[in-house]
Structures are given as C-alpha cells and as structure tokens.
Image (cartoon, rainbow, N blue to C red):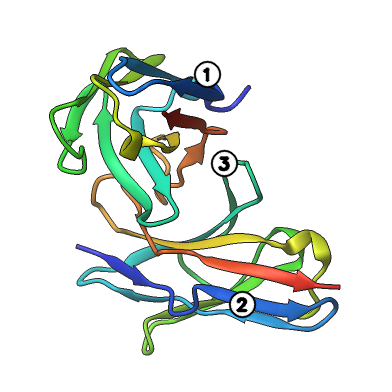
C-alpha cells in the first residue's frame, strides 16, 4: 500500500514571497504523484501530476513540483505567491497497476498574507 | 463535459432523519469514489466502485451508511439515521481506468449539517 505525509499543517507566507509545501510518500511499488488544491468551499482540483520522465513537473498557476525518488519526496513550490493562492493543498499517491484509488495526505493550509 | 455533479450542494437535517446524497460521474468513467472531509479527520475515503460494483467499503464508518451505484451514471450515499457527528462535506470523484495515471476528478461536494 501507499501513504503520504504532509508535515506542515499550516504555512503562512507573505505575498510575493516563495513557498515550499512538503510531501513525502511511502510505497513498495513505483508511483504516480499528485498535488490537488482546494479553494474555500470548493472541491479538489488537480494542480499537477508526476507520471514519469522529467522529475520537475509544472502545473497550473505557476506551481511546480520535483520528484525525488531517493528521498521519496514530491515537494510543491512557487517562486512568488499571490493572495489568490490561499487554499488547502493535498498531496496524493497512487501505485502502478493497482486500483484507481489515491492515498491523500492530511493537507497543508497555505495562507498568503498581504 | 459538465464534470462530476453532486446534489444537493447543502443539506440541513435533524438528527434521526434519513439523508441521501447523489452523484453523477463524468460520462465514460468507470471508477467512482465517495469521500468525507471534516476538520478533525481530514479527507477520508468511504467507498469506491468499479463498473458499478463496490470494491472497497472499509472506510464506511458504520452500518448507518450505505452506498449504491445502480448504473454507470448515478450513485447514492445514504445515512440512516443521521447523527450530528455525520456533519461534514461529502465529495464524489470519478476516474477512468484507461488513464494510466489514475487521476480523479472531484465534484463540488455536499455540505451536510445534522442538527
């Protein structure tokens, strides 16, 4: 089975500052990795995904994430955040060849301070 | 495509009443998932279906919860009788097994309040 750990439950950051949201995963098989974003009172939207190939993945709204197999990490980064980035961010993992279920982390609440 | 559709968007009911949440997955998707989100427990997978058949219901909290998928375009999550601790946002998601990466598409959720 797979699991995900998001160590930071809350991350406050000033507007236009860089941010990194951490995600570590555990799996006995090769994985697909995802970041989802949830804006207030909305469902989850896919931000970006890693399937294979280049370890640096670019997503929507200027976010990117880097897959690091040796450290089993998939940290999310943005060089300059905006007020509109205030949301909950979820990291998720799925194993190759398994059922289509995803294993979600507990989420990180990003608050951008003006 | 309209995406995953859930109804109602908000439901307020009294303890002991039956509650039925509805979901229409994206056309052509063969997996359907029900999640519950609370402040205390985060996002929890309740049950998921493949080709209308329940595959794993180990996340269903207790016998008061039941889920059905009578056809490929409709699923229900029923709580009977409801209790205040069932108050949460319930999400439905769907995915397509032919996609190699298992991406799930989420509905907007149903916010349930049990008084």
Alpha carbon distance from label 1 to label 3: 14 Å
Looking at the image, residue A2 lies above or below residue A26: above
Between B69 and A95, the one lying in front of the other is: B69
Q: Are the residues at dot 2 and dot 1 in contact (C-beta closer than 8 Å)?
A: no
Q: Position of residue A108 (x, y in %)?
A: 53, 68
Q: Nearer the viewer, mark 1 or mark 3?
A: 1
Q: Which residue is mark 3?
A: A43
Q: Which residue is mark 2?
A: A11
Is residue B29 at least partly visible in the picture? Answer: yes
Q: Are marks 1 and 3 on the same chain?
A: no
Q: Position of residue B27 (x, y in %)?
A: 49, 20
Q: Which residue is mark 1?
A: B8
Q: Quadrant of residue B98?
A: top left
Looking at the image, residue A99 lies above or below residue A113: above
Where is the N terminus of chain B found, in terms of image quarters? top right
Tell me what residue is drawn at x 55 percent, y 25 percent. Answer: B10
Q: Position of residue A62 (x, y in %)?
A: 76, 67
Q: Secondary structure at mark 3?
A: loop
């Amino acid at each position: 089975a797979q699991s995900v750990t998001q160590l930071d439950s809350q991350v406050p950051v000033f507007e236009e500052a860089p941010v990194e949201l951490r995600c570590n995963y555990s799996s006995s098989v090769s994985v697909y990795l995802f970041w989802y974003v949830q804006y207030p009172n909305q469902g989850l939207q896919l931000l970006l995904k890693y399937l294979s190939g280049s370890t640096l993945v670019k997503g929507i709204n200027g976010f990117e994430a880097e897959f690091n197999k040796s450290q089993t990490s998939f940290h999310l980064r943005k060089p300059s955040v905006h007020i509109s980035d205030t949301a909950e961010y979820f990291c998720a993992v799925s194993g190759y060849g398994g059922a289509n279920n995803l294993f979600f982390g507990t989420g990180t609440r990003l608050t951008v301070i003006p | 495509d309209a995406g995953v559709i859930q109804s109602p968007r908000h439901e307020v009911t009294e303890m002991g009443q039956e509650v039925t949440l509805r979901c229409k997955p994206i056309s052509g998707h063969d997996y359907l998932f029900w999640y519950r989100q609370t402040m205390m427990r985060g996002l929890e997978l309740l049950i998921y279906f493949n080709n209308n058949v329940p595959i794993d219901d180990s996340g269903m909290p207790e016998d008061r919860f039941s889920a059905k998928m009578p056809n490929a375009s409709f699923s229900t999550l029923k709580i009977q009788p409801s209790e205040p601790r069932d108050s949460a946002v319930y999400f439905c998601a769907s995915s397509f097994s032919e996609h190699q990466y298992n991406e799930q598409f989420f509905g907007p959720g149903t916010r349930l309040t049990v008084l």
